[in-house]
Image (spheres, grey):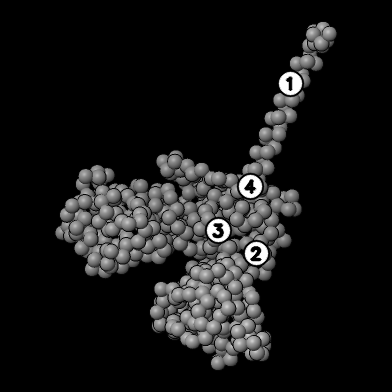
Amino acid sequence: MALRSALHHPVRSAALPTLAGLLVIGGVIGANFYSMWYASPQLVPLEPLERLSALQAGASDADSAGGSASALPANALAAQPNGSLARADGIAAFGGAGSNGAASPAPTRLTDPATAAAAASTLLSRSRAVESGEGLSTALQALQVQGETQRAVIAAYSQLRKPEHLQAGWRLWGRFASASVIDSGSLQSLVIAPASGEGVTVERQSDGSYLAKEGGLPGTLQRQAIRCGIVGSLEASLRRCGEGDSLIAQLQVLLTDRLALPAELQPGDELRLVVDKLMDGDTVVRYVDIAALDIRSVTGQRTVAIHFSEADGRGAEGYYDLQGGSVERMFLRQPLRVGRATSGFGMRIHPILHKLKAHQGLDFGAPRGTAVYAAADGVLIAARKAGAAGNLVRVRHSEGYMTEYMHLQKFGTVTPGQRVTKGDVIGYVGTTGRSTGPHLHLGVRKGGTYLDPMQLGDVMEPGVASRSVKAFQGHAADLLRLLDALSGAKGST
């Protein structure tokens, strides 16, 4: 009977599996769309040659369109190997829709492709990270620097640093005149650098000898302007726009701890950044700096923060608005990334002495060994044992402020007289001195009077000094041109 029914209704029987198939296909497409839109996608990097070709093609397209307004300023990156700066539009990743239903702009990049410049030069690069247990000679051997050249490099480096202090995670970055791994004498320069900051550069001289000098980064600097719509969280949005964990972490600290912004980022807002990346070929070694930040909200409000340092290195350093006024709080919201306030400022029953006593600071409960950061720029004036305070660090700041960090397990790599920058590690949470458990006591004084650290959120850094206003205006204008050029870049909406 079933067979007879199928013979009499062949079209209906054939249509049933087709309809089911369509439902399955629709479900798969819907799931993929949801995953792309709301999840944090695992980004697969392009092969270096493929990516370089794409960047060069983007630059050709941009040049043929006659768009000169978005080219990098001539002084954008003084550290480039050959000083040549070019523009290449990045490949658009994911866009999105904001909470108001309007389409967010597709992420866009304007870059100075330092990797393309390096590839076009006659020098070739090889690099590697130092592995656990390796000495300098072993690391050089793995980089194919051998024999007399290796001995000469070690001898030159030893004039400035002790080779035995090399640590796992440091990077070696060499430039060679030849691709041959046999010809180690083709080494022209070698940077040996820690995981953060600059290192030592060993350079070949005209007579064939090698000379070491302070400074040098293991790669080439690339300045890039990025445009990214906010869809969901900041972290998920930046991942969709192809950026890495290091930039996400730096930006989160900047937005939550350092900058005093009029409003928080919301879905539908647009975030524009100018970032300096340290590149090793097609790999991001690290994000060196967030040079500019531009938030354009769905309400039409625009907030710009420009990173600027005075030329002499002793004056202003921080984030400023376009008029040179500071947009940065003098103090971090809290000197820990992990932990919570457990005891406030004022009178309390002391947990050990069991009597009413003024608590001249703020306590943060945190696991033993948690890093403690300098709450503001200043000069470290003490790092010592101090009785009931345990291991104590004091830092003197501008405007007559001083901060104290007590009960530390141990000190960071700091010495009295050393300048520290806001966010530098100065110690680790402990329970030394008169303490009932691992915590940090933060004290803030001004003119000898203790202040409530919770009431310092409105204290701002000084603005740009009058002697540096002209330099700041030129610096800000260069960065502003990069940010504004994203509006007309390929891939924007």
Vertical arrangement, residue 143 with respect to residue 158, above or below: above
Foreground residue among 50 and 395: 395
The label on residue 39 is 4
Question: Which element carries disc 1, helix, strand or loop?
Answer: helix
Q: Residue furthest bottom?
A: 448
The residue pinned by badge 2 equals 302
The label on residue 310 is none
What's under tag 1, amino acid-wise?
Answer: Pro
Find residue 156 and report its horizontal and vertical position in percent: 22, 64
The residue pinned by badge 1 equals 17
The residues bearing labels 4 and 2 have C-alpha atoms spaced at a distance of 28 Å
Find residue 6 and report its horizontal and vertical position in percent: 80, 11
Can you say which quadrant of the picture contains the N terminus? top right
Tell which circle, 1 or 2, labels the residue nearer the N-terminal end. 1
Find residue 491 and report its horizontal and vertical position in percent: 58, 46
What's under tag 3, amino acid-wise?
Answer: Ile
Question: Which element carries disc 2, helix, strand or loop?
Answer: strand
The residues bearing labels 1 and 2 have C-alpha atoms spaced at a distance of 55 Å
Vertical arrangement, residue 331 with respect to residue 86, above or below: below
